[in-house]
C-alpha cells in the first residue's frame, strides 16, 4: 500500500497537482507496516495451542458433561472471543485478529457439537459448507486475512469431502472462490493469497480427477494445475501491489 502511494504522490508532484511538502504530509498519514512478524506469529501459535488444550481437556471429560453445558462451553467462548476482538481492535489489532480467528474456530466446533448432541445425521460435507458460510462474511466485513485464509481452507476441505461432480456443487464452489479472490484483491494479503491458491489448486485437481479419472492423459495433465495457479497468482499479486 505505501509503495503504491509513494509512486502516486511522486506522479502528482511531477504533474504539479501537489507540492513536495504536501506529498510528504500525505504519505506520513500512512506509516509503513511493521516488518516484524513475531508478534502475530506468536499470537497465532498461542491461539492454536489454547484451542487444542481446551479441546483435549473436554474430550477427556466429555461423557460426564451434560448436553446443556457442552453447548454453553462452545457458544459462550464464541460470543466472548468476538466481543473482546471488537473491543481490542483499535489498540491491540494483532490480538483482535487472533481472537476473531478463535471465534471462527469455535463456530465450526459448535456446528459439530450441536450435530453430535442432538444426533443430527446429515451429509458430512454440509458441516464444512455451513462453517464456511459463517466464516466468509466475517472476513468480508472485517477485511481480515486470517479468517479469509480459513475460508479458503474450508472451501478446499468441502470440495474434497463432497467428492461431487454435480454442476450445482461446482457452480457454488466457483462462486465462493470468486468471492474469496475478490477479497484477496481488496486486502492485498500475501498470506491469504497463498492459502487461496493452494485451495484453488486442490479444487481444480479434485474436480478434474473426478470428471476425467478414466482418462490417464488428462489425469496427468491435472498435476500441472497447481503450478499454473501459483504462477498466475504470483503475477496477479505482484501487479496488484504495483
Image: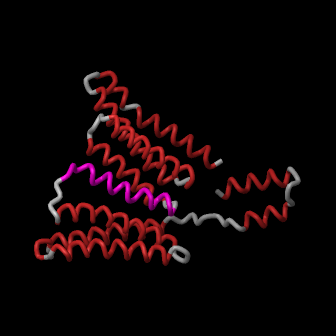
The location of residue 81, given as percent across then percent down, is 39, 74
The location of residue 199, given as percent across then percent down, is 39, 45
Residue at the extreme right: 16
- The image shows residue 171, relative to residue 54, as above or below, that is above
Q: Nearest the camera: 103 or 220?
A: 103
Q: Is residue 139 magenta?
A: yes
The location of residue 143, given as percent across then percent down, is 52, 60
Q: Nearest the camera: 1 or 37?
A: 1
Which region of the structure is painted magenta?
122-142
Residue visible at 85% across and 51% down in the picture? 14
Please tell me in which quadrant of the rendered image residue 83 appears: bottom left
- The image shows residue 99, relative to residue 237, as above or below, that is below
Q: Is residue 128 left or right of residue 42?
A: left
Quarter occupied by the N terminus: bottom right
The colour scheme used to paint the residues is: secondary structure
- The image shows residue 28, relative to residue 129, as above or below, that is below
Q: Is residue 164 left or right of residue 29?
A: left
Q: How many numbered tags mark residues here?
A: 0
Please tell me in which quadrant of the rendered image residue 71 appears: bottom left
Residue visible at 37% across and 26% down in the picture? 221
Q: Main secondary structure of the magenta part?
A: helix
Q: Is residue 239 magenta?
A: no
Residue visible at 33% across and 64% down in the picture? 105
The location of residue 137, given as percent across then percent down, is 44, 58
Residue visible at 44% across and 43% down in the picture? 175
Q: Is residue 138 left or right of residue 130?
A: right
Please tell me in which quadrant of the rendered image residue 30 appears: bottom right
Amino acid at each position: 500500500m505505501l509503495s503504491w502511494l509513494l509512486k502516486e504522490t511522486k506522479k502528482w508532484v511531477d504533474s504539479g497537482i501537489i507540492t513536495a511538502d504536501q506529498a510528504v504530509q500525505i504519505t506520513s498519514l500512512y506509516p509503513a507496516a511493521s516488518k516484524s512478524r513475531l508478534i502475530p506469529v506468536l499470537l497465532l501459535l498461542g491461539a492454536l495451542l489454547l484451542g487444542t488444550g481446551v479441546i483435549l481437556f473436554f474430550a477427556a471429560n466429555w461423557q460426564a458433561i451434560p448436553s446443556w453445558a457442552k453447548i454453553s462451553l462452545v457458544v459462550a467462548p464464541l460470543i466472548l472471543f468476538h466481543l473482546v476482538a471488537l473491543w481490542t481492535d483499535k489498540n491491540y489489532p494483532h490480538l483482535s485478529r487472533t481472537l476473531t480467528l478463535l471465534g471462527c474456530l469455535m463456530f465450526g466446533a459448535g456446528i459439530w457439537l450441536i450435530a453430535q448432541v442432538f444426533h443430527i445425521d446429515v451429509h458430512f460435507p454440509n458441516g464444512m459448507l455451513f462453517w464456511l458460510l459463517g466464516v466468509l462474511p466475517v472476513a468480508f466485513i472485517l477485511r481480515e486475512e486470517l479468517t479469509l485464509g480459513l475460508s479458503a481452507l474450508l472451501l478446499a476441505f468441502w470440495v474434497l469431502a463432497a467428492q461431487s461432480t454435480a454442476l450445482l456443487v461446482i457452480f457454488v464452489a466457483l462462486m465462493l472462490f470468486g468471492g474469496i479472490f475478490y477479497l484477496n484483491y481488496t486486502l492485498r494479503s500475501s498470506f491469504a493469497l497463498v492459502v487461496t491458491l493452494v485451495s484453488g489448486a486442490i479444487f481444480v485437481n479434485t474436480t478434474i480427477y473426478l470428471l476425467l479419472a478414466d482418462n490417464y492423459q488428462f489425469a496427468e495433465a491435472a498435476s500441472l494445475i497447481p503450478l499454473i495457479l501459483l504462477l498466475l497468482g504470483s503475477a496477479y499479486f505482484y501487479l496488484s501491489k504495483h
